[in-house]
Structure formats: structure tokens, C-alpha cells
Image (tube, grey):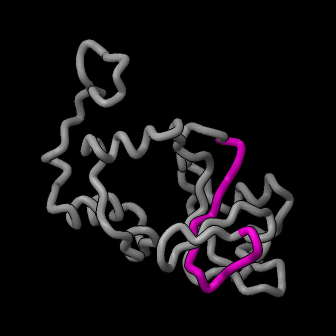
């Protein structure tokens, strides 16, 4: 999202502690880009935390941002990724896309979800699938189709 966590926290009037590590803010998708979410390790839990897969939680409260910023007594998650917006699907749409093999997917890998260097996580994910960037097409269907599966 071309913004650092410190900039986002400043907009929310949350101070980033001197010893807190600044992090990039990721673009989660085009839906509700005025809202954020935090994917994190499950060493951090609050009542609203949703476990999305083994070892990974999702929390969307302001409190997690305060904890990450170092401004609270509760310890921040050891690993986390902050994203703005999300990608959404209609009822049954994702299941249909998965059944049509429209998605390449694999089991969750903490090193890819919470990378030390986010610039390499895409290549790591592709390698996990046995694919390189050169094997992917940069082209959309032409002419553009109303069927999202063809684009």
C-alpha cells in the first residue's frame, strides 16, 4: 500500500514506541480500503481474534495496533502483517473458483505469511508450488470478458 505502519498509526493518533519496529502496510484488496486487519501469530489473542489456520490469527481491533505500537501492557504478537482492505467474494464464489482450479494454493507456510523480507515472499510462494514468475502470463484475456475466470 506504499505506506509504513508509522504513517498509518500517526493518522490514527497512535504513537509508535521508540523500540517498536516499523513495518510496511500491505494492500489486502479493493474492498473497504478505509479499514485494516492484522494477520498475526497466535501468541496474541483477544476475544475478537479469529484463528484462520493453525498458528495464524486475524484481529481487526484498534487495540492490536496499540499493542503492536508498544503503547500497552499486553505484548504484541511475535509475527504480524498489517493490511488495508480485503478481497471479497459472493456466496459460493470462492468455492466455485477453487473447484475450477482458478486458484493456486498450498498449505500455509509461516515463512511466507510472515516473511523477514516481504519482497521475496511472492517468489517463495511460487517456488513452493513449483512455479516461477516466467511461467505466469502477464496478459488478460482479450477482448476483456465479463467472465472473471477468463481474465
Q: In this view, does 148 lie to the left or right of 18?
A: left
Q: Where is residue 49 in the image (x, y as percent from the top left)?
A: 68, 70
Q: In this view, does 43 lie above or below 93?
A: below
Res 4 visible: yes
Q: Is residue 48 above or below residue 18?
A: above
Q: Where is residue 27 in the image (x, y as percent from the top left)?
A: 54, 48
Q: Position of residue 30 (x, y in %)?
A: 56, 37
- Does 130 appear in magenta? no
Numbered circles on residues, count: 0
Q: Is residue 94 left or right of residue 86?
A: left
Q: Residue furthest right?
A: 13
Q: Quadrant of residue 46?
A: bottom right
User: Depth check: 142 or 11 in front?
Assistant: 142
Q: Is residue 13 above or below residue 85?
A: below
Give me the residue at 41% from left, 76% from top: 110
User: Depth check: 63 or 106 in front?
Assistant: 106
Q: Quadrant of residue 146?
A: top left
Q: Where is residue 62 in the image (x, y as percent from the top left)?
A: 79, 63
User: Depth check: 49 or 134 in front?
Assistant: 49
Image quadrant containing the C terminus: top left
Q: Is residue 8 left or right of residue 63?
A: left
User: Depth check: 37 or 6 in front?
Assistant: 37
Give me the residue at 23% from left, 16% from top: 142
Range covered by the magenta-colored residues: 33-48
Res 16 visible: no
Q: In which quarter of the image is residue 130?
A: bottom left
Give me the residue at 76% from left, 60% from top: 9
Give me the residue at 50% from left, 79% from top: 55
Amino acid at each position: 500500500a506504499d505506506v509504513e505502519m508509522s504513517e498509518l498509526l500517526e493518522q490514527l493518533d497512535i504513537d509508535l514506541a521508540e523500540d517498536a519496529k516499523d513495518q510496511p502496510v500491505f494492500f489486502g484488496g479493493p474492498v473497504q480500503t478505509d479499514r485494516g486487519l492484522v494477520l498475526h501469530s497466535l501468541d496474541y489473542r483477544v476475544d475478537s481474534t479469529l484463528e484462520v489456520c493453525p498458528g495464524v490469527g486475524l484481529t481487526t481491533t484498534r487495540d492490536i495496533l496499540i499493542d503492536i505500537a508498544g503503547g500497552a501492557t499486553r505484548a504484541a504478537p511475535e509475527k504480524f502483517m498489517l493490511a488495508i482492505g480485503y478481497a471479497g467474494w459472493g456466496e459460493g464464489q470462492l468455492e466455485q473458483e477453487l473447484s475450477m482450479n482458478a486458484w493456486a494454493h498450498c498449505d500455509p507456510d509461516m515463512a511466507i505469511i510472515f516473511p523477514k523480507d516481504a519482497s521475496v515472499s511472492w517468489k517463495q510462494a511460487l517456488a513452493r508450488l513449483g512455479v516461477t514468475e516466467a511461467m505466469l502470463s502477464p496478459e488478460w484475456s482479450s477482448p476483456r470478458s465479463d467472465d472473471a475466470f477468463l481474465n
